[in-house]
Image (tube, rainbow, N blue to C red):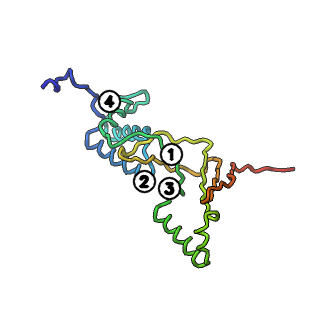
Amino acid sequence: MAGDSPCCRKMEPPSELFENEENVLVSWILAMAKRGFPVHKTNLIMSVKKYLEDNGREPRYLNKSKTPGRSWFEGFLKRHPEIKQKHAESLSKARAAVTQDRIHRWFDEILDYFKENNLQDILRDPTRIFNGDESGFMLCPKSGNVLGPTKSKEDFYQRVSAEKEQITVMDTFSADGKIVPPMLIFPYKKMFYV
């Protein structure tokens, strides 16, 4: 067949790993992404290097840092289209713990409180219903590209420490369309007065 001749096929360098070894890596990457700890390219490459060293094998396609190079990484992504590289959004541990069940429970508790205190009329008055949303703007946002499932239409999130400095903005709107002036919270600075 004409399509099978070597001159007509694009040749790629073989992988550093056997197929079953790469499949273990794929499972690890997808599991970590699902749990909110996506794998960075550097972590993947260093893991492959360590695995090869531990098994007495040396990467065939080394770069200057003696790790599998860019061509191996790009080939890995081509061989496993279920994984893609994407920029991760930072998400604090507290925010990552929010679930649909917890949100429903919170609304049920609020409704119970309104009923116990005979305040249900508030829910029928749009001037008394407000929605507030807090947004944090990191002063040094660094998350980088991470690996995760291709089929995911959602953004990738990476849990980060909440200790980094940020400016927090609280925007609040009423159900009838009025805007409350935003509240800004700046990083805490201790001031000493003499």
Judging by the rendered image, the residue that carries numbered circle 3 is 96
> Residue 80 sits in which quadrant?
top left
- The first of marks 3 and 4 along the sequence is 4
At label 1, counting other C-alpha atoms closer than 10 Å, the crowd grade (few under 14, some 14-19, many 20 or more) is: some
Query: Please, what secondary structure does the residue beneath circle 3 have?
Result: helix
> Mark 3: which amino acid?
Ala
Instruction: Measure how far apart labels 3 and 4 are at the Cα level.
Output: 40 Å
Establish if 166 lies above or below 123.
Answer: above
Q: x%, y% of residue 42? A: 44, 38
Q: Residue at x 47, y 61 (%)?
A: 99
Identify the disc placed on residue 35.
2
Judging by the rendered image, the residue that carries numbered circle 4 is 60
Q: Is residue 59 left or right of residue 162?
A: left
In-front residue for pair 13/53: 13
> Residue 55 sits in which quadrant?
top left
Identify the disc placed on residue 89.
1
Instruction: Measure how far apart labels 4 and 1 are at the Cα level.
Output: 34 Å
At label 2, counting other C-alpha atoms closer than 10 Å, the crowd grade (few under 14, some 14-19, many 20 or more) is: few
> Mark 2: which amino acid?
Arg
Identify the disc placed on residue 61.
none
Q: Residue at x 37, y 46 (%)?
A: 149
Contact, mark 4 vs mark 1 (Cβ under 8 Å): no
> Mark 1: which amino acid?
Glu
> Residue 112 sits in which quadrant?
bottom right
